[in-house]
């Protein structure tokens, strides 16, 4: 079955992820309507934990399915960044008594269940291979990071929980950098495809 032009573009992006330079300049995309609404602490924490698990699990699939060392390196960085984010969130919330203490002696964060949306996105990825997998993964990463940036930006500015707002503010630049990298790579591919046609 031939891939749609969008998936062809995303597949090309997946191949080019390694050549786009990382940047620490934050993106300037406007926040969604979430920014005008207060977000409850529990909703924020559950969304972040699920999103981190999705990012880690989907990046592990990249390590299994990608042939590109550069794409695998980016996946490893995603795993490290999102594992750290999940641990930091757990540390903040467990100190406040909002998260259950883990049963292990190592005091590891407890297991997290994916939201139905994140579970569906991961299931979609698991059914794909090759260029189709890479295209679907880049699309999923783009959507997930846009949502995460909006969520963290909104929570950082509209939270009544000082510790979690500080966590959101501290984590936001990492998410913006990841999204900026994905966006720059996509733009580079679009330019290349436009000049090739």
Image (cartoon, rainbow, N blue to C red):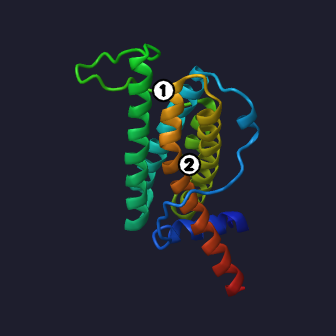
The number of numbered badges drawn on the structure is 2
Q: At 49% across and 64% down in the image, what residue appears?
A: 23
Q: At 39% across and 53% down in the image, what residue appears?
A: 77
Which image quarter holds the N terminus?
bottom right
State the image quarter where residue 102 is shown: top left
Location of residue 144 in the rendering, given as x and y in whole percent from the top left corner: 60, 46
Which residue is tagged 1? 163
Residues at marks 2 and 1, CA–CA distance in whole angstroms: 35 Å
Residue 125 is marked as 2
Determine crowd level at label 1: few under 14, some 14-19, many 20+ residues with C-alpha closer than 10 A. Answer: some
Location of residue 169 in the rendering, given as x and y in whole percent from the top left corner: 53, 40
Residue 113 at least partly seen? no
Front-lying residue, 65 or 155:
155
> Which SS class for mark 2?
helix
Location of residue 175 in the rendering, given as x and y in whole percent from the top left corner: 53, 49
Q: At 44% across and 17% down in the image, what residue appears?
A: 99
Q: Name, please, the residue furthest toward the left.
A: 105
Location of residue 7 in the rendering, given as x and y in whole percent from the top left corner: 66, 63
């Amino acid at each position: 079955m031939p891939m749609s032009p969008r998936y062809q573009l995303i597949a090309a992006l997946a191949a080019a992820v390694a050549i786009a330079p990382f940047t620490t300049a934050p993106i300037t995309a406007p926040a969604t309507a979430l920014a005008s609404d207060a977000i409850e602490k529990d909703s924020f924490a559950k969304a972040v934990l699920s999103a981190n698990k999705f990012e880690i699990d989907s990046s592990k699939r990249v390590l299994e399915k990608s042939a590109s060392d550069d794409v695998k390196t980016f996946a490893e960085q995603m795993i490290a960044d999102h594992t750290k984010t999940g641990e930091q969130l757990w540390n903040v919330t467990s100190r406040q008594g909002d998260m259950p203490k883990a049963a292990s002696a190592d005091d590891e964060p407890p297991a997290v269940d994916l939201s139905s949306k994140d579970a569906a996105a991961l299931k979609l990825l698991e059914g794909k291979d090759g260029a189709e997998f890479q295209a679907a993964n880049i699309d999923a990463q783009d959507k997930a990071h846009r949502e995460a940036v909006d969520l963290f930006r909104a929570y950082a500015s509209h939270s009544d929980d000082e510790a979690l707002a500080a966590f959101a503010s501290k984590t936001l630049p990492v998410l913006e950098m990841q999204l900026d990298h994905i966006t720059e790579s996509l733009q580079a591919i679009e330019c290349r495809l436009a000049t090739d046609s």
